[in-house]
Structure formats: C-alpha cells, structure tokens
Image (cartoon, rainbow, N blue to C red):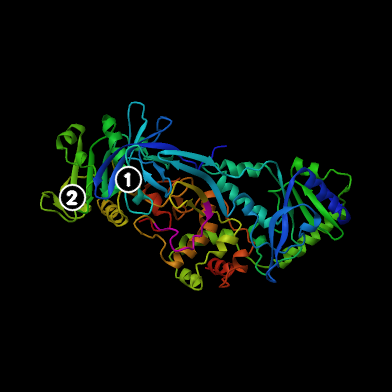
Amino acid sequence: MEKVLDKAHFSRFLGDLVTKYKVIGPTKKGGATSTYTYTTFDYVKRVEDLEIDYKSSMLSPKRIYFPDSQPLYKYEKNGQNVKLEDLREVWDKERVLFGLRPCDITAILCLDKVFMEDSFVDHYYQDKRRKSIIIGLTCSETRQHCFCSSLGSGPDIESGYDLLMTDIGDSYFFRARTDLGKELISADYFRNATDQDRELREAKLKKVKERLSEKVDPAKIISVMADKYNDELWNEFSDNCFTCGACNMVCPTCHCFTIIDKTSPDGSEGTRVLVWDSCHFERFAQMAGNLNMRGEKSSRFKHRLYHKFYYTAKQHGSVSCVGCGRCMEFCPSHIDVRAALRRLQEG
Amino acid sequence: MNNLYMPELALVEDIKEETSNIRTLTISLKSRKPFSVLPGQFVELTIFGYGEFPVSVSAVLGPTRDRLQTTIQRIGKVTKETANLSVGSTIGIRGPFGNGFPLAEMKGKNICIVTGGVGLAAVRYLINYIIENRDHYGKLQLLHGARTPGDLIYKDFLFNNEEAQEQGIEILLTVDQPDAGWEGHVGVVTELFKRTTLDPVNTMAVVCGPSIMMKFATQCLANMGFGDDQMLVSMERRMQCGMGMCGHCMVGQKRVCLDGPIFTYGSIKDALERAF
C-alpha cells in the first residue's frame, strides 16, 4: 500500500503515533556546553523534538535494542545465601522507531541474525523487536562516506520496516510493508498515492543513488578474501589505526560485547553488566594465561573486516556491513575502509 | 522471559586439590536438578563478586546425575578466586554450552587421546564415557604430559595400573622436568608416540592441551598418517557468553562456543585464522 501525507499534516500523524505508542526518533543533542551538536535516537513527544532532516546519527539506533551498557542481573550475597534479581529491560508497550535510515534498518536485520536467529535466542532482544514498529525514512542527501548502494542496504530497501517514508517535496510518500503499517496510514489525512507521486519518489531516490558513486562489490571481496588472509596489505591498511575502537562503537552491526561485574567493595552485592567491546582492543582475543591470539594490531584490523564481509557471509549468508560510513566518518585516523575494500577487489 | 545470562545457583559439595594451583570441584544445583551434559561440553561458572569463566566439564556423577565435576587451574583473575571456595560455598553455573565430542562417529573406532597439563580435564568425561561403554570402542590410549610430576592432575586415575588394565586403557605419561622420585619418561608428549604402537587405520585421535603442544601433536599425528578429519581438537578460548554472540571466541569464521569446542583438525584449519 502506498499513501501520501501533506507535510502540513505531519504533526497530526506524529500526534496520533505518540498517543498510542512511545515514539523514538532522531533528536538533536549537545550544544549546551560546547558548539558541538549531534543527532541521536531518543524519545520524542512533539514535532519540535524531532530532527527529521538529520543527515546522520553518530550512534546508530542499535542502542535501542542492544544498549552500550546493559544490566543483566543483580546478586546479593549473605553468607552462602545468594539472591539473584533479573535486571534486563522489558518494554511495557510497543515502541515506534521513527525516521530510521535504510542502512540502519538493514543493520537491525544483521543484529537479528546474531541475537535471535542463530543457535540461541536472546528473548529480551526478541521481545523488543516484536514490540517495535519501524518507520523508515529514505535519505535526501548523501554524505562523504556513504556506500549503501554497493551493499544493497540503500537508498531504497524492500524489507525490515512497517513503513518507509520518502520526502517528495511538499509531502511524504509512505510505503507500507506490514498490516500494521497499512493501519498507521489509514487516517483520513493521508491520500492515495498517484503515479505522479511514485515518479517523484523514484526520481528522488535515483538522484541519491547517482551520488553514491562508490563501487564496492561484496561478492568479489568475499571471493578474494579467502586468499588474502596472509597478505602484506593488512599491515599497510592498519598502519594508521590507533586501535581506539571508535569504528566498533559507531558501527550499526558491531555486536561484540564483554561481561563485567560491578561489585560493592566487600563483594556482598553487585551487578553483572553487558557492555560493548571492541575487537580492536589489544586484549580482545587474550585467553587465561595471557596467550593472545590477536596480539598484532594488523590481525585485529583484519579480523574486523573479515568478520563484516567474509565470516558473516559464511555464517549467515550475507555481509554485515551496511555502508553507513560511520566507521570512516568517526575514525580519528581517517582510515577509509572503502579504499581497503577497493584494493582487495582489484586483487 | 528466560534471562540467558542469569546463572543457576549451585553448591560446592567437594573439593579435591589436584596440584598446587589446580582443584577439582564437585558441585550440585541447589534445585537438585540433574545435569544434562555431553562429554566435551563446557559450562560458565560464576564466583559471585568476581565474575564468570568458561570451564570444561570433567564428569557428571550420581545415579540421578545431579553432581558435576570440573577441574580448575587458577590462572586468571576469576579462577584465582576459586582458591577461596570451600565445601558449602555457593557459586553460579550456566550451560552446558558447545557441541561435545562426536560420540556416534567415534563409535567402533580406536581412540588415542593426547593431552597436556590441565587439558586432560577437558577429555576426562570422554574417557569416563568410553570406559562405561567399553564394548562400543576399540583400543583406548591416553598419552599425557605435564610440566613436572607435581603438575599431574587425576593422579589416582593415572597411576592405578590395575584399574587401567581392567578398563582396557593404555596410559603413557611424561614430564618435562622430572623430580627425584620420577621413574617415567622425560620429554614432550609427542615423544610418547614412539613408545607405543599407533595405527591410524580406524583410529580417531583427540588432542587437548596448551597451544604449542596442540600444534606439534597434530603435526606429529599428521606425519603418522592421521587424516585431518581423524584428529579432534578441544579448543580453548575466552568464551564470555557461550551463545555465539559476544565475539570473543572466534577462530576465523568459527565460534568455539557454538561450532566447538570440539573440532576436527580439518574444520579448524579451514578457518583462516591460526587456531593454536
């Protein structure tokens, strides 16, 4: 189903969403103590809270399902009596995730494969996913590091959402993919899409796609990687890496984590917490007895790209890079992953 | 909802000092539920106040299988705290995790187990299983090495020649550094291959030990004619979640916690990244 909403009615639409659901969308943060502002996903109540024309969010919406620091359970120890209390977050009702970019929606599908479609199901993650209504928003502009079109995760996508919006000038074009999505655009302030609206949408997305000139070929990269594991290239690629882990933190598909205990000084009570980890950190693959399987910086740099492209393709059938460009945008050393991928595919 | 990260509470029922820094704990669940664990699988133990660590299961005991044994070397931050456990201590346990040994494929074959140090703990349950189902397996050999005689675990088992004969298991031992009382072989574990007859035909080798030992043991076995899929390795990594999510135990595309910890040498060799 395809409908169109006049921008003048947008606040009514958002109002209706907010009455029925909790809505999470792109919001502008920072600026209070510095001139630095950034976009992040947070709860919104009014149109003014939303930064609907945002270009990118530093942190992807993965935090909504997979928080950077997630309390798992609490323990209290009294002698040998130990009491455990589940601390994992459960949503009271459905959430609308509003304004997600196609790359970030595709990234959520990558996380699903890890947290609920492999051997074990994280029921808390799954519950949040089931309580999610996803309203995507296609991009009107591209940024310096975007390369979603090479990886099939943008500018237009076919799945992963209830509704996908496109700004077509004075109005928003809505494409519904689920029954719930259809219901959400059944209000009388929506009108049926015409052929002209469809053409506007196509033209808009075509323009975006034309600007995404990067040609990274995942199939080629996967086939080349099998023979490039011990290549000298990896030393060169990783030479400027600080191993700071920024790329992991901003990546919408990085899912590696560590489990830590926060305990009281006497150890009688504490909380076990799941926190994001980085495969670039020196001790990521260190074992008891200090044997480190990836002590070399280049082996860790290589591991991240092999995980994104080669290993996940073997495990889950598709790559787990969505071309959002964040790892390059926020790399303090300006490492351009696309350049590395290009070198690989050129042989 | 089932919180996969919450451990079940367990009680330390017995502690056996194996060496100066290795103990075997016998534990039972406070709920008294039976343990359903296969040889080769591992569990995650929690020492409340310190953290969690993965460790292999060495035995499941009792008519109702409600007691589990695990042998722990105090080598890291959390395992060091096991020194402070006593009978009656409460710990946490999650699992079991991992694939376990391919018992069906091993059936009918001769089994040659090559271990080093505390690596023996990871195959102890397999040895027990084979002894309990002795008719289903051919010749059973254990080639085990330790740094010094004092570092040998399961001494009651290793030095009971009579019982070994009854159970049909050939045990060969070696140490790197002998002490005054040591009359056995001195040298690395791979030297034991020369002191016994080992025919690759219809035989599966099982290797578990320190990284370097696994590297040389698999090399020696390959030279003796063992095929890549005739060698099983029990891998060590720092599995934090045990469920294929945290990323810490990846060896190339393999996840030791899901695809392992038991691999055929062939499958781990295909994983690009070095395994040992």
The residues bearing labels 1 and 2 have C-alpha atoms spaced at a distance of 30 Å
Residue extending furthest toward the top: B63
Chain containing the residue with disc 2: B
Do badges 1 and 2 share one subunit?
yes
Say which of marks 1 and 2 sits in front.
2
Image mark for residue B21? none
Q: Identify which residue is drawn at 79% across, 43% down.
A: A182
B269 above or below B70? Answer: below
Magenta stretch? A274-286
Q: Which residue is mark 2?
A: B149
Circle count: 2
Counting from the top left corner in percent of width and height, residue B77 is at 38, 54
Amino acid type, residue under disc 1 in the picture: Gln
Give the residue number, with chain letter if any, for mark 1. B230
Residue B99 in the magenta stretch? The answer is: no
Question: Foreground: B26 or B248?
Answer: B26
